[in-house]
Image (cartoon, rainbow, N blue to C red):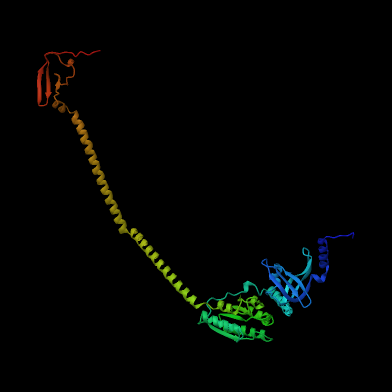
Amino acid sequence: MAKNVYSVRQVNAYIKNMFVQDFMLNRIYVKGEVSNCKYHTSGHIYFSLKDESGAIACVMFAGERRTGLTFRMQEGQKVIVLGSVSVYERDGRYQLYAREILPDGEGDLYRRYEQLKRELEEMGMFSAEYKQPIPFYNRKIGIVTAPTGAAIRDIMNISRRRNPYVQLILYPALVQGDQAAESIVKGIQTLDAYGVDVMIVGRGGGSIEDLWAFNEEIVARAIFECRTPVISAVGHETDTTIADYVADLRAPTPSAAAELAVVDYRQLVESVRIFKNQLADRVEQKIVRNRDRARYLQARLLQASPQYQLREKRQYAADLNDKMRQAFSDKVKDRRHRLALYAERLDGCSPLKKLQQGYSYTESPDGKALTSITQVKEGDAVTIHVTDGTVVARTEGIRSLERNG
């Protein structure tokens, strides 16, 4: 039995270390045909590269995909993959970890594309601060594209449908071939000098070679220096060119560019109608508010006038006079009532009243009220007052009232 026995993990780790130490396998370009391509929900891409002699498993993680893949891979597509070969220890199999994927035959163009893109970005030509806003109401729209092809037909159809009153001015440019870049630049400069509200620069889709004119530096600089706002509309939605980064606005397709540049006339008319109604309502509301305020201010002005103040003071004086008269009348009534009560009470205390009830008033000889037997003696004359006169009498006897002790 062998003395040295290794676990599967140790063997896989050893083999992986051998791959890691191999400089060539850490940065290698591999070309082949895409097979079993699967876009995972996590963002990773799993696929195989194959040729007539064999196949190799590949994976591109989501983090690398954002910068290393500019198109959507399809089955049977020829590509060049830049990455590193290493061992996945859990399964004990090696695979290619992709960092960048380019279509085969277009690798040199893509490298030129990426280099120019980095250079122009460092110059600030992609910066948002240099982007011009796209006008909303455009009456003259300049178009730099081929006079024949799907792009100009789509733009014309959509423009006619959305707003038949917009004027389209076409500069028939070459959009493919050796002279295409110079032709596009000439078209941009011509329409910019002519004076249009907005400019659409683009063409239909194609391969990277077909679209290469829009990746040329002279085209990018012409768009950047253009005083007219530029909408780029190159290729399909997945195609991206240098012109797209420099332009003031990128449209995914020429049709989308037309929709961005041409306002929908029917929607515009409907918006005007809505705004008109809203304006009328607001004007009516403002008139009503101003009328109410005018009435309020008129009432306040009337209240502040001398005539109004004098009338108010007169009314106030009249009210006070009425209140004073009423208070005086109430006071007199109260005093009369109290006087009647006092008169009743006084009447109840009147000597005449007592006399009428059968009582009499007797005076002593000296004219004082006779209240004690000590004031008279026998034989004295006394005067007795009754209700209808006086009686003069003489005292015949005096009797003392016995009091119980």
Question: Where residue 24 sits: x, y (%)?
Answer: 82, 72
Quadrant where the C terminus sits is top left
Indicate whether 167 appears above or below 370.
below
Q: Residue furthest front?
A: 1
In the rendered structure, the answer to whether residue 198 lies left or right of residue 11 reads left
The N terminus appears in which quarter of the rendering? Answer: bottom right
Q: Is residue 251 left or right of residue 320?
A: right
Compared across the picture, whether 10 is left or right of 72 comes to right
Work out whether 214 lies above or below 327: below
Residue 239: % across, % down: 65, 77
Residue visible at 17% across and 16% down?
A: 375
- Is 189 in front, or is 348? 189
State the residue in front, 398 or 118.
Answer: 118
Quadrant location of residue 290? bottom left
Coordinates of residue 127 in the picture (x, y in percent):
65, 72
Query: Toward which corner of the image does residue 282 lie, by quadrant?
Result: bottom left
